[in-house]
Amino acid sequence: MRVFFGVTVALLLLTAGCLESGSDSPPPTDPPPPDPPPNGGDSMHVFASGFEPTVSIIDVNENFSDIIGSDGLDWQSDLEDNGSFGNFRIFYEGGNNSQRSARIIEYEGGHVLEFRLSEANVNDGEKGRVSTSLTNNVNLTEFAYSVEMNLTDAFELISPSEGRLTWMTIAEFWNDKAQTEHAFRITLSIQKLDAAPNTALTWALHGQTQNTTSLMWDDVWTEVSEVTVPIHTWFTLQIGLLEGDAEHGRVLVKIGATVLFDVQNWTHHPDDTTPGGFDNLNLMKLYTSAGALSQLPEGRAFVILWDNFILSSNEE
């Protein structure tokens, strides 16, 4: 981590009016204890990491890597073996390190997690992916997290160029996972909807079901924000989700003190009468099309730096 973080769960409460004002300036050096969980559960599971040198990434196979070690809390015993959260991996879906990579690197006198994507690495060049994957979660009906991020390197080339960008996923949440009867996903992405050069990048959020025959995704709801996506600038992404129907489901997304989205709508499949929680979370994700990657000049890559990650759930 670049500085010791003081972001608290108070920033992530699922009511926008309860959110503490924030900024991109360095947080205080001593974090206060977490506030009570949003819905008043009996306990709260909190995990945090600043990607210090005592934490490392190991390769599992061409599809997966893992984060191991501890910089205060352990990535296995304090995350995977504790509470509602399941198995954590970094997911590539193929390829090699020349095309995609996840590394902990030195940066500004500290250490950060770097996602780098330079070529389409999935299905013989169909798309590109580097993503965290927290799967097999148990009855995870409510969670919130905060992470500092910096979109850098080739992200600076998108706005000045001619053409649209409609696929650049930054985070994704599944209730249930793909290719199941009640597959439902909530996707946060950045976009450039006007092809004209020097059009700003903005944010998009949608909830979708999957057709069980065609496997195509259909919108249940969509939201857009005209807030400009920062490039080469550190900002704090804060997200909270609550499982529910069109009246009780909730998605809150902030960057710093700015609310991008505060959505009251379905956060599970509308036909699922007994939803079982968010079984797969892609909390940090870099996922885009082969078309976007094919336009990168030689030696350039889409790079996202991540730091000061905090995740909490409301444990029943």
Image (spheres, rainbow, N blue to C red):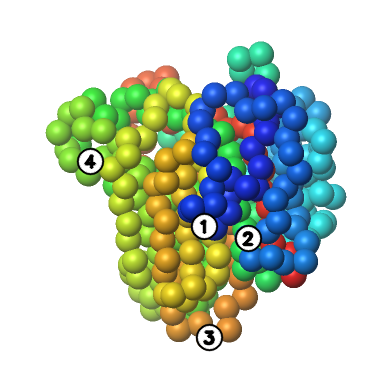
Instruction: Tell me the mark number nearer the camera, choosing from 1 and 3.
Output: 1
- Quadrant where the N terminus sits is top right
Residue where numbered disc 1 is placed: 15
Quadrant for residue 213, please give it: bottom left
* Separation (CA) of disc 4 from disc 2: 38 Å
Label 3 element class: loop
Which numbered disc flags the more N-terminal residue, 1 or 3? Answer: 1
Identified by mark 1, the residue type is: Thr
Identified by mark 4, the residue type is: Arg
Count neighbours of disc 3 (C-alpha within 10 A) and say few if under 14, some if 14 to 19, many if 20 or more. few
Residue where numbered disc 2 is placed: 38
282 versus 236 height, above or below: below
Instruction: Tell me the mark number nearer the camera, choosing from 4 and 3.
Output: 3
Residue where numbered disc 4 is placed: 164
In depth, the one of 249 and 49 nearer the eye is 249
* Separation (CA) of disc 1 from disc 3: 25 Å
Mark yes or no: residue 122 visible. no
Instruction: Tell me the mark number nearer the camera, choosing from 4 and 2.
Output: 2
Q: Name the spot of residue 155 as percent of width and height, x first.
A: 38, 29
158 versus 207 height, above or below: above
Residue at 67% from the left image edge and 23% from the top image edge: 3
Residue where numbered disc 3 is placed: 273
Instruction: Tell me the mark number nearer the camera, choosing from 4 and 1.
Output: 1
* Separation (CA) of disc 4 from disc 1: 34 Å
Quadrant for residue 113, please give it: top right
Q: Name the spot of residue 164 as percent of width and height, x first.
A: 22, 40
